[in-house]
Image (cartoon, rainbow, N blue to C red):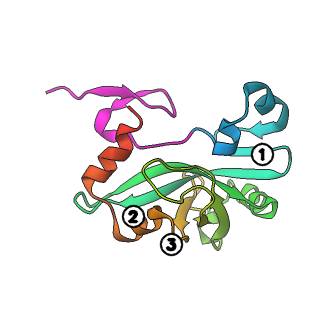
Amino acid sequence: MTQELVKCPCCEKMVPKNDVELTFRRPDNITALDSYEIEEKCKYNDDIYIYDNQDFYIRCVLDLPVQDKGGDYCLGVWVKVSEKSLNRILDLWDDENQKNEPPMQGLLANNVPLTVNSLNSDVMIRLSGVTSRPYVTVKNEACSLYQEQTCGITIHRASEYSDLCR
């Protein structure tokens, strides 16, 4: 039996279809810019976007427990943070003990399809280690991701998110 492969929208590698998770390449505010504006006004890499030296974004993982599977389904999202928080994250970037840092406040910078009130929802980010992206905890109870993160999602719901990538 062969596994069907699809191109990952984030890294463009071919991966097993069942392993694809929804990932956003950029914060929504940056996605709305044309390529000229991005090159002129943004400093960025795969993990950080700085727009016009006033808006600061960090790439994170929002994990949703999957009830039927016993694991997590992870959304690759962006979080807007303060300049102070970004500087602290950068100070700890290669620090093995960064996971001991207290959580930081931020705002979800993506409008996650199939959800309600996700864009600009209050979140907390927790640094997790030098080889992994920070984790997001949704704090806004009006955001449907809050309920999904608290209670978990079904394997069917995880599949609905993955279908958005295909």
The image quadrant of residue 40 is: top right
Q: Is residue 9 magenta?
A: yes
Q: Name the residue under label 3.
A: 141
Q: Sequence order check: which comes first, mark 2 or mark 3?
A: 3
Q: Quadrant of residue 47?
A: top right
- Disc 3, SS: loop
Residue tagged by mark 1? 50
Which of the two labelled residues, at mark 2 and mark 1, occupies the earlier sequence position? 1
Q: Indicate whether residue 59 is drawn in magenta.
A: no
Q: Does residue 58 sit above or below 124 in this rendering? A: above
Compute the Cα span from label 1 to label 3: 28 Å
Q: Give the range drawn in magenta.
A: 1-24
Q: Which residue is drawn at 67% across and 59% down?
A: 95
Residue 148: mark in rendering: 2
Instruction: Check disc 1 and give the amino acid type.
Output: Ile
What is the secondary structure assignment of the residue under circle 1? strand
The spot of residue 82 in percent (x, y) is: 77, 61
In the image, 67: left or right of 32? Answer: left
Q: Quadrant of the N terminus?
A: top left
